[in-house]
Amino acid sequence: MKYNLIIGGLAAMVPLCGLHAQEKTAPAEEMSMEDRKASVTNLETHIAQREVRLAEWSSDIVDLDARIENRVNELVKMLAGLRDSKESRTKVNQLKKDAIEGLKRGIDLYVAKRKEIREKVRTGETAALGDLGKFDKRIFTRVDQIAELTKSIPTHQDVDKYESDGGSYWNGYYRENSRISDDWRQNRRDTIKSDKFRGDTTKALNGTLERLDQRRRSLKDLMANRKLTDSAKDLYTSELGQIDAYEDHINSQLRDITTATGGGGKAIGRNQAHDVGNIIDDARKDLREDVSRLFRAYDKFANGRSYLEGLKTNLQARKDWLEKNDK
């Protein structure tokens, strides 16, 4: 209540102060031609300064993005090159499953950010149109990495179910004992996991194809039945081409997933699997922080780019005025 009273009191005082100031303020003087010419020079200096800063931000984004991609690629390659043993049972496959879920969440983050940029382009910020392809490239990469991990899980192998467990003589006859082979048990565990992972990945990719098809129909309807701005028309045309690229890429990965056999990695024990899990956990935290930094850096760059475009528009307007009026 006290705060509101103070604000209200200030608000009541402002009109009186403003009226008093208006009565005594002289009309603004017209800028001289020399001042106008100087303002153009100063604005050009300002623009050059902002261009340098924008280039620095762009370089920072490129470096951070490269670091993220190198780290993710290293982790995927490491996991894809490992497989479970009789000692680790299903620990490596579980690590791969967790990594796949993390990659899916990464796709969701890039898709959400892409939607923000797409809306800016639709409403007239055409300079951001080229950024959409960069986010698309990252989404493609994550799809490839999910497919690589999925394909690395061993499929069914022909392994003898029983193995000799020694034998004994009884009443003059030799009787051989047998037991279920540990290799057969591990192969069965791998097969169950492989079938499930491949089924889940295939289902997710097919769902993406369905959404892309729906998006294509929606865009074609918009272009056929709506009066669009030039920026929206350019965006939708670009989006239709990108949908085709998405579909081709996903269909290619679907074919690979269904035909790959996997199982060529190095079998590791329980303790090694535990160590790899610790590596993945720490890397996941680092990557989460880096991706957040990347998006913040991009927002700063995008805002700076818009500001710079406004300065350039202002500069051109000043030059046009001088050309028209400096006789």
Image: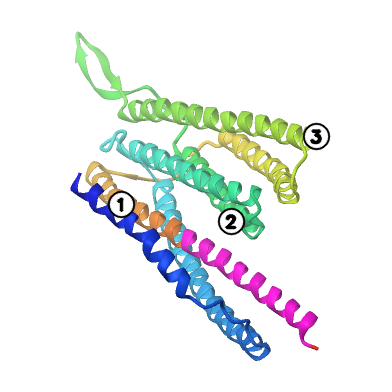
Number of on-image labels: 3
Q: Which mark is residue 285?
A: 1
Q: Main secondary structure of the magenta part?
A: helix
What kind of residue is marked 3?
A: Ala
Residue plotted at (77% across, 39% down):
227
Span of residues in magenta: 298-326
Label 1: state its secondary structure. helix
Q: Is residue 305 magenta?
A: yes
Q: Which of the two marks, 3 or 2, is nearer to us in this view?
A: 3
Position of the C terminus, as image quadrant, is bottom right
Residue occupied by mark 2? 134
Q: CA distance from mark 2 to mark 1?
A: 24 Å
- Colour scheme: rainbow
Q: Which mark is residue 37?
A: none
Q: Which mark is residue 224?
A: 3
Q: Between residues 200 and 81, which one lies in front from this camera angle?
A: 200
Q: Is residue 54 left or right of residue 168?
A: right
Q: Between residues 16 and 201, which one lies in front from this camera angle?
A: 16
Percent position of residue 3, x then y: 22, 50
Residue plotted at (52% across, 36% down):
261
Residue plotted at (50% across, 66% down):
62
Q: Residues within 10 Å of mark 3 (few under 14, many from 20)?
A: few
Q: Earlier in the sequence, mark 3 or mark 2?
A: 2
